Image (cartoon, grey):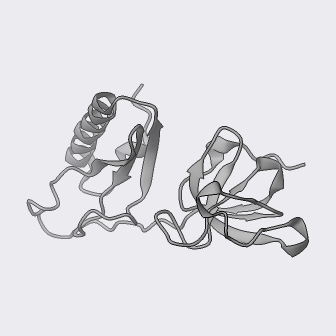
Amino acid sequence: MNNYSFHQFNYNDTIIYRKAIVAAVNSNAKPQPESGGPYRAKIVDFTGWSIGVRADRFGGKKPLYYVRLEDILGHEPEQRKIATPATVAPTMEELRDRYYVQRVREHVFFIREAQPGQAQSNVDPIVRRFVYQASASVEAYVKELNEGQRALDALHGLWKVRAADINFD
């Protein structure tokens, strides 16, 4: 028996697992029985009883499988890019909001952290996810997060401290 729980995983983390159940959306995919494992895949979904995985990544084209917590053998968090501070005065692009909302499904939202000098993309780190939240409350959360980030940037300099790492409660 392992000691894994849902809260320690994030989208695009890699898990190693014993076996998985083929998702109904791709019922023609090859099964993943225990005798063929261990398997390795990226986390792309969370349900009340399992974790959805694909061999490629979130939004990928590989078959979707569901893994129960008790079948997980190992966990490798996604490698995050480390932002480096600029050595010159910030440009208008650098002063844009650092955190933004990405709607994944009707009631599923990701809060992502934009990277310096890059356009928003699906590889931006996921800071938080909201499930079954009204979009207005998610937008209000991001607004507060960005206001906190601007205050931290004024005190410590751009890209020195992440507001997402601080509990403002």
Residue depicted at 17% across the width and 60% down the height? 94
Residue in view at x 33 percent, y 34 percent? 138
Of 150 and 17, which appears nearest the observer? Answer: 17
Q: Quadrant of residue 120?
A: bottom left
Residue under the point 45% across and 32% down: 132
Q: Is residue 161 at all visible to an observer of this figure?
A: no
- What number of labels is visible? 0
User: Looking at the rendering, which quadrant does residue 92 occupy?
Assistant: bottom left
- Residue 44 image position (x, y, % from top left): 55, 57
- In the image, taking residue 33 as reference, residue 146 lies left or right, namely left
87 is higher (above) or lower (below) than 68 = below
Q: Residue at x 21, y 49 (%)?
A: 97
Q: Is residue 19 visible?
A: yes
Q: x, y percentage for residue 113?
A: 34, 54
Quadrant showing the C terminus? top left
Residue 2 vs residue 142: left or right?
right
Q: Residue furthest left?
A: 92
Image side of residue 89 versus residue 3, left or right: left
Residue closest to the far front? 28
Furthest-top residue in view?
A: 169
Q: Nearer the viewer, residue 123 or 103?
A: 103
Q: Position of residue 111 (x, y in %)?
A: 37, 46
